[in-house]
Amino acid sequence: MSDIIVPQSDVKLCTRNVNLYYGENHALKDINLDIKTNKITAFIGPSGCGKSTYLKSLNRMNDLIPDCKITGQFLLDGEDIYADGVDTNVLRRRIGMVFQKPNPFPMSIYDNIAYGPRVHGIKSKAKLDRIVEESLIGAAVFDEVKDRLHKSALSLSGGQQQRICIARAIAVQPEVILMDEPTSALDPVSTLKIEELMNTLKEKYTVAIVTHNMQQATRISDYTAFFLVGEMVEYAPTDELFSRPVDKRTEDYITGRFG
């Protein structure tokens, strides 16, 4: 490991010289990327290019995969999240995750949201009630579910379930929210609601999203990184990357010549 890098004040997550291997497969190659505070950063690229692998490494989800080896630095506010002694439960509270398919727990809407705060020691019903309500409001789903908080979250539509999962993520007051293709399983109306929600979320959180939908990246993200075969080919403000790509491979991808 090289010396710790002092990040710029507007950078929330900083990765330097990151390589990731699944056994013999070199899945990420020398990734250097700064994820800006209170901005939405989109990762685009064809299937299997490493974008979801990179996203999951940002809160150590890849720790759960056998034969996964990672080198380089992942810094959250300048601190190495892969350093010895880092509590991954605390880390995943600071860096929340929303997955591709809505995955509410098979319990009530209320208990889905209260689950994380309870795990982290909050017992007071009044405090839990407040967290549940604030989180559901923050995920733009409170008005739709306020009269059925004690009904199963699995009874909701797919779009509502995904917003419940976002509410569950923000209930523990994270600093960063990672989203792995959060709208790919949703209809256009639900997708629009999630996109509108993301623009609100960045006021409080730093957001990183993997998306296959380039139009979605242009609509919602401030910065975009293009991945290809484990490399990060190009990273720039979204309007620049889509209107004036520097690398020919980026241009070929966004104009539909491959991918």
Image (cartoon, rainbow, N blue to C red):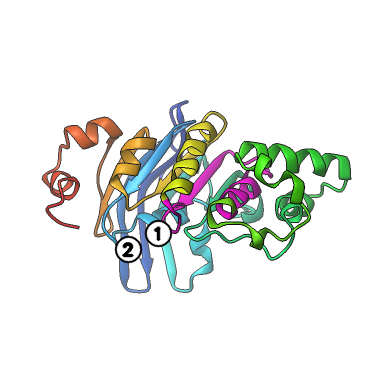
User: Residue 124, how many percent across, how many down?
Assistant: 88, 44
Q: Please state the extent of the stretch shown in magenta in the rendering.
A: 161-187
Q: Which residue is mark 1?
A: 53
- Rendered image quadrant of residue 132: top right
Check disc 1 and report its element: helix, strand or loop. helix
Residue 253: where, in percent of width, then height?
A: 18, 50
Q: Tell me how far mark 1 sits from mark 2, CA to CA.
A: 8 Å
Q: Residue at x 60, y 52 (%)?
A: 165
- In the rendered image of this protein, does residue 70 appear above or below residue 213? below
Quarter of the image for the C terminus: give it. bottom left
Q: Residues within 10 Å of mark 1 (few under 14, many from 20)?
A: some
The reply to whether the magenta stretch includes residue 194 is: no
Crowding around mark 2 (Cα neighbors within 10 Å: few <14, some 14 to 19, many 20+) is many
Do residues under tags 1 and 2 come within 8 Å of each other at their CB atoms?
Answer: yes
Give left or right: position of 49 versus 193: left
Give the residue type that dot 2 points to: Ala
Q: Nearer the viewer, residue 40 or 36?
A: 40
Locate residue 208, reporting x and y percent. 44, 43
Q: How many marks?
A: 2
Percent x, y for residue 6?
46, 32
Q: Is residue 179 magenta?
A: yes
Mark number for residue 27? 2
Left or right for 247, reference 133: left
Viewer-proximal residue among 133 and 121: 133
Q: Is residue 95 visible?
A: yes
Which of the two labelled residues, at mark 1 and mark 2, occupies the earlier sequence position? 2
Q: Secondary structure at mark 2?
A: strand
Q: Is residue 83 among what the camera can see?
A: no
Q: Amino acid at mark 1?
A: Thr
Which residue is drawn at the image coordinates 18% and 33% (left, top)? 243
